[in-house]
Image (cartoon, helix red, strand yellow):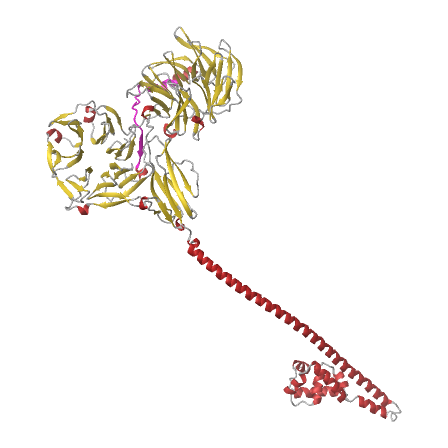
């Protein structure tokens, strides 16, 4: 069954035997799409200022790139900017019917100055400026029909016109040349054009560029390759790449600082030639570029090649120590193992084993029979072993021979003192691979350990250490025959970690995992943490504990940000750690299966998920320095655009912001364009955050709602593993809010004084009122007491009046009864004197006098009021009214007046008449109301 599956896989992958996988290794290329840079597709010219910022002429306008952000400036007349050249602090640009220069203002923004008003003659209708070059104090603006010479010192113009099309202008060794279609090549002498080369050969094609060449000129044509003009003789430059150039349509070309050439074509991408014309490589849309049409080329100060394309912008790190092979079609798969054997480069991937001849651009070829997962490649005694999912293969050039069909061969180790035997780890345990009669095969299985064995090392003659990602670290004791395990010990001191690894390096047995690298102590028979080696895996960017020892005895480790390698000092025998900044997101390696192999000299190969990377350690520039730039400072405005801040006052960084503007935005960058080098920033804001922050890739910081006070903003960068040369410092102050200003505080003091005085006065008035109120209450209390006493006196008087009235009534009633009895007595004549005495005591005048005195004591003004209202009343009427006011009954009044009750009713009637009372009105109530 296994054999059938194996055959099926081989048939599926048979086509790889004839599949050409393009084997060109190219420098890293950073790609920028129109969405990235915020412009349109086409990019016509590229230049760079002294601070390393990149400027690009784009269909939309002028693009600026500071290493972190792109910014677009609209062209002055909304036409395509076709030429850009930076000279000093100016960026000269040309477009349709317009040319001039841009400069930074005090806010760090570009502003444009047109030179057209200084031009004494009108431009030709619909004229475009296609090229700009500098020459001493002159700037030359070239269109198809004219060359405008601008003197930067005098602000004057000179103009050279041409009837035929001027294709390009050149500055060769401080001499100005220009080419005209159908006429040839001119140079400027004493301010006038002079024909230098006129040859029918050049008339056949457009001249793309001129280069200095020995004592003459090297002429690049669009379709006919290079020509050499020397000693007034024009000849073809016979170079290895001549035939390639004749088949391409060249649009741009430049000669680099090292005298090599980069050529941009209209439909075939980019061609890189050595200084002698040998093709180094060709890059197109298939293997690296964003587009096949190259419109512009530029070499920056760091020797990166900027490529303006018909659709996008690319930056090629030509001098990078890294070269990349990318399997764009996915034919190779993920690379798990690499080996250099018999002058061939072998790649073991998840799809099989591939190879190509070393040092050539020939394609990779699939080795028949190896379809499936390759785990390892191992060279022993001049033979190449392949650990494969289907077992163990011996590789001889492009042939693979299966020598062990035990599934899943992870790796191999040499058994001490046994030259013809190898120990191999498989999915199901350990096996002995033996060579008999020149043929390798399985000798036996080591019984007693049935787990998968991927990471293992032979420590002593009969001792094997194994690291299992899910079960831990084991030590196996093996019998002398190497066919059985006599003892198994799992080390409880080492934690289990799926990305851990176990490896032997310089006689050290190392176990690496997230917490560090542990070194086996042979004396104490235990693993101890190695403080020197641990940083290679335990830094903040831990990703995998995988360790690799290459053929040069370097120990390699891999983290998210770096590749580290360890060497041993020959004198001190101490470990030395070296870090190379290549982030994992760019390496794209399979975690836990990282691999690296020595290629030649100081060059190494790293397997990736879609190819491999070559790394030349000797090309790494350890001394290169980097500067960080503060680009803009803005005041955050949530409703409108941010407000730019002038941060170059008097040449110093200082600022003063109103409290309402207490949200500040800082933009900064490092203009480094190495694709495989990460840039991170660290800041502190003295006055609020006095410690350095964590590293962050963001090139912008926003401090919201800062309290008032003095601050110092500091920012530095880390490029790869190296700190920037400088630390930017900017002092600023957030002013106090108006309500906390000195004038406001003085105002507050006055207001407080006023409030205090007002409060004092109010309290004084309040307490005065309170005192008056208390006094009033006291007086009212006294009055109340007096009134109470008066009321009591009145009540007493009323009581006395009532008692006196009732006494009179009782007396009169008694006397009347006595008188009545006396009259009824038969001897009434004898009673006459008594009756007279009774009548005398019934004298109402005496009773009235006594009653009137008592009544007036109680109600003084009543009788006077009645007299005043009713002056016609008689004294008897007043007496009657007084009795009525006391609310006496008719019977009681009759007794007081010594009259009959009927007479009292008659009196009532007459009194109503005198007082003119209505029938319904009560006489008593009326008198009570008076």
Q: Which residues are magenta?
A: 8-33
Q: Using the rendered view, name the quadrant where residue 738 is placed.
A: bottom left
Query: Residue reaching furthest bottom?
Result: 829
Q: Quadrant of the N terminus?
A: top left
Residue 847 versus residue 40 in the image, above or below: below
Of residues 282 and 660, which is closer to you in this image? 660
Of residues 75 and 545, which is closer to you in this image? 545
Q: Quadrant of the C terminus?
A: bottom right
Q: Taking 867 as reference, is 894 left or right?
A: right
Position of residue 794 measured from the top left corner of the image (x, y, whole percent): 71, 77
- Determine the residue positioned at 37% across, 31% down: 720
Position of residue 429 measured from the top left corner of the image (x, y, whole percent): 48, 16
- Determine the residue positioned at 53% across, 65% down: 761
Q: Is residue 799 covered in magenta?
A: no
Q: Taking 16 as reference, is 167 left or right?
A: left
Q: Taking 787 as reference, is 655 left or right?
A: left
How many numbered badges does the structure rendering display?
0
Q: Is residue 222 visible?
A: no
Position of residue 724 measured from the top left corner of the image (x, y, whole percent): 35, 34
Of residues 194 and 384, which is closer to you in this image? 194
Q: Taking 576 as reference, is 781 left or right?
A: right
Q: Using the rendered view, name the quadrant where residue 213 is placed.
A: top left
Query: Residue reaching furthest top?
Result: 437
Q: Is residue 12 covered in magenta?
A: yes
Residue 123 versus residue 426 in the image, above or below: below
Query: Residue reaching furthest front?
Result: 571
Residue 311 versus residue 906 in the image, above or below: above
Position of residue 79 measured from the top left corner of the image (x, y, whole percent): 23, 43
Q: Is residue 748 visible?
A: yes
């Amino acid at each position: 069954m296994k054999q059938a599956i194996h055959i099926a896989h081989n048939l599926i992958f048979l086509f790889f035997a004839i599949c050409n996988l393009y084997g060109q290794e190219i420098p890293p290329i950073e790609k920028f799409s129109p969405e990235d840079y915020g412009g349109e597709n086409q990019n016509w010219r590229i230049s760079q200022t002294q601070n390393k910022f990149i400027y690009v002429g784009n269909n939309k306008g002028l693009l600026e790139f500071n290493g972190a952000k792109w910014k677009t400036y609209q062209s002055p007349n909304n036409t395509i900017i076709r030429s850009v050249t930076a000279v000093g602090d100016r960026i000269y640009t040309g477009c349709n019917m317009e040319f001039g220069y841009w400069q930074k203002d005090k806010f760090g923004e570009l502003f444009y100055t047109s030179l057209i008003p200084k031009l004494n003659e009108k431009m030709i209708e619909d004229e475009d400026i296609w090229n700009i070059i500098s020459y001493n104090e002159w700037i030359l603006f070239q269109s198809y029909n004219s060359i405008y010479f601008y003197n930067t010192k005098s602000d004057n113009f000179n103009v050279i016109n041409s009837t035929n099309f001027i294709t390009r202008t050149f500055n060769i060794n401080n001499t100005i040349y220009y080419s005209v279609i159908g006429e040839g090549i001119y140079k400027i002498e004493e301010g006038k054009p002079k024909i230098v080369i006129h040859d029918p050969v050049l008339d056949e094609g457009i001249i793309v560029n001129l280069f200095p060449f020995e004592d003459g000129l090297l002429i690049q044509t669009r379709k006919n390759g290079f020509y050499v003009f020397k000693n007034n003789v024009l000849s073809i430059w016979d170079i290895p790449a001549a035939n390639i150039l004749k088949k391409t349509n060249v649009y741009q070309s430049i000669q680099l600082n090292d005298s090599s050439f980069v050529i941009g074509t209209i439909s075939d991408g980019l061609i890189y030639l050595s200084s002698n014309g040998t093709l180094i490589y060709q890059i197109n849309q298939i293997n690296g570029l964003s587009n096949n049409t190259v419109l512009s080329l530029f070499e920056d100060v760091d020797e990166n090649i900027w490529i303006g394309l018909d659709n996008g912008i690319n930056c090629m790190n030509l001098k990078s120590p890294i070269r990349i092979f990318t399997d764009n079609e996915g034919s190779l798969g993920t690379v798990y193992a690499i080996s250099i054997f018999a002058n061939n480069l072998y790649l073991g991937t998840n799809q099989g084993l591939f190879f190509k001849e070393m040092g050539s651009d020939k394609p990779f070829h699939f080795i028949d029979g190896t379809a499936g997962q390759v785990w390892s490649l191992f060279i022993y005694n001049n033979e190449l072993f392949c650990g494969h999912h289907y077992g163990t293969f011996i590789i001889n050039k492009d042939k693979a021979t299966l020598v062990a069909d035990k599934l899943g061969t992870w790796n191999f180790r040499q058994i001490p003192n046994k030259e013809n035997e190898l120990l191999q780890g498989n999915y199901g345990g350990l096996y002995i691979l033996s060579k008999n009669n020149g043929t390798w095969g399985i000798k036996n299985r080591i019984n007693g350990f049935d787990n998968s064995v991927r990471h293992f090392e032979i420590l002593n003659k009969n001792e094997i250490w194994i690291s299992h990602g899910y079960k831990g670290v084991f030590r196996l004791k093996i019998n002398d025959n190497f066919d059985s395990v006599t003892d198994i010990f799992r080390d409880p001191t080492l934690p289990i970690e799926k990305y851990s690894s176990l490896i032997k390096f310089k006689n050290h047995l190392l176990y690496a995992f997230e917490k560090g690298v542990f070194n086996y102590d042979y004396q104490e028979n235990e693993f101890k943490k190695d403080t020197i080696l641990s940083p290679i895996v335990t830094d903040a960017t831990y990703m995998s504990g995988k360790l690799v020892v290459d053929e040069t005895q370097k120990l390699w480790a891999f983290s998210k940000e770096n590749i580290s390698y360890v060497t041993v000092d020959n004198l001190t025998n101490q470990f030395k750690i070296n870090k190379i900044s290549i982030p994992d997101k760019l390496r794209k390696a399979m975690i836990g299966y990282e691999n690296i192999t020595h290629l030649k000299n100081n060059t190494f190969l790293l397997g990736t998920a879609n190819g491999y990377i070559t790394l030349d350690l000797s090309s790494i520039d350890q001394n290169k320095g980097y500067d960080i730039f503060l680009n803009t400072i803005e005041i955050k405005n949530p409703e409108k655009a941010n407000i730019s801040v002038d941060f170059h006052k008097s040449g110093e960084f200082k600022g003063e912001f109103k409290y309402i503007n207490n949200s500040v935005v800082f933009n900064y960058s490092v203009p480094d364009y190495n694709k495989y080098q990460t840039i991170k920033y660290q800041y502190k804001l003295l006055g609020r955050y006095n410690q350095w922050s964590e590293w962050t890739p963001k090139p912008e910081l926003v401090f919201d709602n800062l309290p008032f006070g003095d601050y110092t903003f500091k920012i530095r960068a880390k490029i790869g593993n190296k700190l920037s040369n400088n630390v930017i410092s900017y002092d600023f102050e957030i002013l106090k809010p108006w309500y906390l200003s000195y004038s406001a505080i003085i105002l507050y003091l006055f207001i407080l004084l006023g409030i205090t005085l007002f409060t004092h006065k109010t309290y004084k008035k309040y307490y005065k009122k309170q005192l008056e109120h208390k006094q009033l209450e006291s007086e009212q209390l006294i009055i109340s007491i007096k009134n109470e006493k008066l009321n009591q006196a009145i009540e007493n008087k009323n009581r006395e009046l009532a008692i006196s009235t009732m006494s009179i009534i009782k007396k009169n009633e008694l006397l009347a009864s006595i008188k009545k009895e006396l009259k009824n007595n038969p001897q009434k004549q004898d009673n006459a004197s008594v009756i007279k005495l009774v009548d005398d005591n019934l004298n109402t005048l005496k009773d009235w006098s006594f009653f009137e005195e008592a009544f007036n004591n109680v109600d003084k003004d009543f009788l006077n009021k009645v007299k005043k209202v009713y002056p016609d009343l008689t004294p008897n009427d007043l007496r009657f009214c007084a009795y009525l006011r006391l609310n006496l009954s008719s019977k009681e009044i009759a007794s007081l007046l010594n009259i009959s009750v009927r007479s009292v009713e008659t009196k009532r009637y007459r009194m109503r008449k005198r007082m003119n009372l209505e029938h319904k009105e009560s006489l008593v109530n009326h008198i009570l109301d008076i």
